[in-house]
Image (cartoon, rainbow, N blue to C red):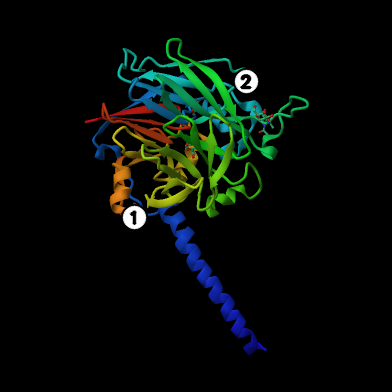
Amino acid sequence: MAQNFRGPRAIVWAVIALATGIFYQAILHNIIFDTIGIGREIQPIDDFPWSCNRLRHPLIEGCEDIWLDSEGRKLYATCTSLDTRMAWCPGGNKYNISARSRTDHIAVLDIDQPGSNGLYGLRQLKIGGYQDYLDLVGFDVRRIKGQLRFWLVNHRPPIDQATGEFLDASVVGANSTVEIFDLNDNTETLEYVKTIASDAILTPNNLAVEEDGLAFVVTNDHNKKVGKFRDLEMLFGGGSLTYCRSDTGKCYIAAKEGFSFANGIVRDKNGLYYVAHSVTGHITIHKMVNGQLLKIDEIHTGYPLDNLSLDTDGNLIAAAFPDPIVSRKSLTDPYNFTSPATVLAVNKIARQIKERGGKNTEVLKIVEDRDAKSLPSATIAVHDAESRRLILAGIFSPFITICEHI
Ligand SMILES: *[C@@H]1O[C@H](CO)[C@@H](O)[C@H](O)[C@H]1NC(C)=O
Ligand SMILES: *[C@@H]1O[C@H](CO)[C@@H](O)[C@H](O)[C@H]1NC(C)=O
Ligand SMILES: CC(=O)N[C@H]1CO[C@H](CO)[C@@H](O)[C@@H]1O
Ligand SMILES: CC(=O)N[C@H]1CO[C@H](CO)[C@@H](O)[C@@H]1O
């Protein structure tokens, strides 16, 4: 009998070994070396040619996303109190609706005028024509006929239509929508235009708007709004891209294979979309073909990534976590604990992809802060090509940082 079993058992073990090998290659290797970062050298900030300053004010706490108006020379940021971020953060499985401080707002800074207090005239935009409260995270902006139009991801708490009471968000998830607003520059008021609500806007993290200001693409960081096994998506991947039209309000899922916590997204002038995968550290490049956002190439950065931005010279900037284990600590005690941060750049990304392909694309580390001296626990970095400054913010950071090139 024993003889008889040897054959099948050997096959079973061979299959397990093979599967483990593949798993190791595909996933574990990635987790150990890219996600957790064993053996990665983290450099002190003094190794880099930047002089960095922290800006502290309640209006620039918990800024998830920032957008630089390089023409109007203003910086816009979606911020709220850290207490809110720790209570209500559907992407991070935090669902306590009542613990929100309801202070979400868009902060504005005049980026070329530091002023006597060094806060760049910090203030917040007013909101017009919108009755509800906004729960802000990622956003994008386009200048259309001289006016700035904002697309804001809004993690609305779910509401029972019959009673008007909140539903349990840990059971049904957030009711995430995209809100469109036009900025009235004279009064600094965002005037409500419309809401895009769709089942395809599932777990939105960030979005990128097309040049024409009509179509936009949303990253969903998970496959499901809630659920027992949602965290396993961290290991086995999850997420998708949703394509929407601002005019018709129609949305559909336009790519769903091969994501691992789809996070930041940007679109370049040639119509290519770049998507950051937080867990694997890959940046995938997508092109619209027959209504689907086809993956045409990818770049392996070797770092767990967060949000992306493109500067006016076509350089891609990525905020990365060099030490995710320490980063987790800064999520639970963000006032007292800032995690190390890394900013990566892929210069002239469109040209590099075209000429060398994703595999041979050069990924540069432009600044790193091992000792968390100056940078925030950054989830977004933008580069102002005109003044050669970097601006960094973090969803769980009580300040933002501006770095000048020296
Ligand atoms: C939600 O937050 C409120 C107010 O801070 C608190 O009283 C309550 O216990 C929290 N609920 C849960 C489920 O953590
Ligand atoms: C979600 O928001 C949309 C847009 O305001 C609304 O029509 C819908 O009823 C909301 N659904 C829930 C469950 O809150
Ligand atoms: C704008 C944007 O993509 N923000 C994301 C940055 O990363 C954090 C942490 O992963 C996400 O929660 C944000 O949604
Ligand atoms: C242990 C510690 O330093 N706690 C501090 C963390 O930050 C908060 C808010 O600034 C302080 O009140 C705590 O004392």
Question: In the displayed image of the protein, which residue is found farthest to the front?
Answer: 290
* Quadrant in the picture for residue 67: top left
Q: In the displayed structure, does residue 140 sit left or right of residue 170?
A: left
Q: Which mark is residue 2?
A: none
Query: Which residue is at 47% across, 50% downward?
Result: 294
Viewer can see residue 43:
no
Three-letter code, disc 2 = Asp
Q: Quadrant of the C terminus?
A: top left
Question: In the displayed image of the protein, which residue is found farthest to the top?
Answer: 187
Lower position in the chain sequence, tag 1 or tag 2: 2
Relative depth, front residue between 337 and 5:
5
Q: Quick one: SS at disc 1?
A: helix
* Quadrant in the picture for residue 269: top left
Question: In the displayed image of the protein, which residue is found farthest to the left?
Answer: 406
Ligand 1 rendered quadrant: top right
Q: Is residue 323 above or below residue 142?
A: below
Tag 1 residue: 359
Determine whether label 1 and label 2 are within 8 Å by CB.
Answer: no
Query: Which residue is at 59% across, 76% downward?
Result: 12
Q: Which mark is residue 132?
A: 2
